[in-house]
Amino acid sequence: MIEIPTDIPADLVPLSWLVGVWEGTGVIDYRASGTHYEGEFSHRVSFSHDGGPFLNYSATATLLGTDEKPAQQLTSESGFWRLARPAHDAAPGPGLLPALAAEPERTAEDIEHLRTPEGGFPVEVALSHSDGVQELYVGEVKGPRIDLGTDAVVRSAGAKAYAAATRLYGLVDGHLLWAWDIAALGQSLASHASARLAKVS
């Protein structure tokens, strides 16, 4: 059963099941340039909101140590998740530019107008990684499932080759499950990591 927080803006109701802190473990299994990357990692993900029409997101992952290798900090991510909707004068930005009009409080009926023919809602996710990669994902949230694919990827000069990705999130038996496929290091899109997380707060 999905519980909807009572203080959440209408825009976030389709994403409300994500809100909270999730922890667990996952596995890495990816082959590129003759190297097989594999291992188990601990993972912590946080989704929160501060009254705006978006979720704040942060995540950290640490490769678990073995007898042969110590634990290793992997990339951290931060970003924002929101329903996709057309730009309008009541939205602030870009930058620090204020909104040109006041926006009335949005209702569940307003959000229903965003529903896709497939029965879900369009979603946008902007992520920044500590390794110099930025991603813009577009996709759909449909009940307790979210499918995302990169619309754009930007890399700093010091970042490794990374061209595209897809992500799948789902709520299964009270756990947050996700899978992340990437096209990186010269390889085409392939499975790379997955995890199972439990809500801790």
Image (cartoon, rainbow, N blue to C red):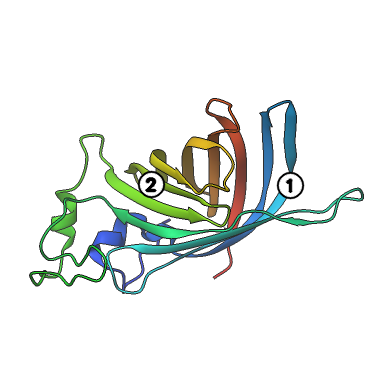
The x and y percentages for residue 106 are 15, 65
Spot the residue most to the right.
67
The x and y percentages for residue 200 are 58, 67
The one of 17 and 43 positioned closer to us in this rendering: 43
The one of 45 and 34 positioned closer to us in this rendering: 34
Q: Quadrant of residue 37?
A: top right
Q: Quadrant of residue 81?
A: bottom left
Q: Amino acid at mark 2?
A: Leu
Mark 2 — residue? 136
**Other-residue count near label 1 (Cα within 10 Å), few / some / many at <14 / 14–19 / ≥20:** some
**Other-residue count near label 2 (Cα within 10 Å), few / some / many at <14 / 14–19 / ≥20:** many
Q: Is residue 172 above or below residue 34?
A: below
Q: Residue at x 58, y 28 (%)?
A: 186
Mark 1 — residue? 40
The x and y percentages for residue 79 are 43, 59
Instruction: Say left or right for 45 vs 98.
Output: right
The one of 73 and 201 positioned closer to us in this rendering: 73
Q: Residue at x 58, y 52 (%)?
A: 131
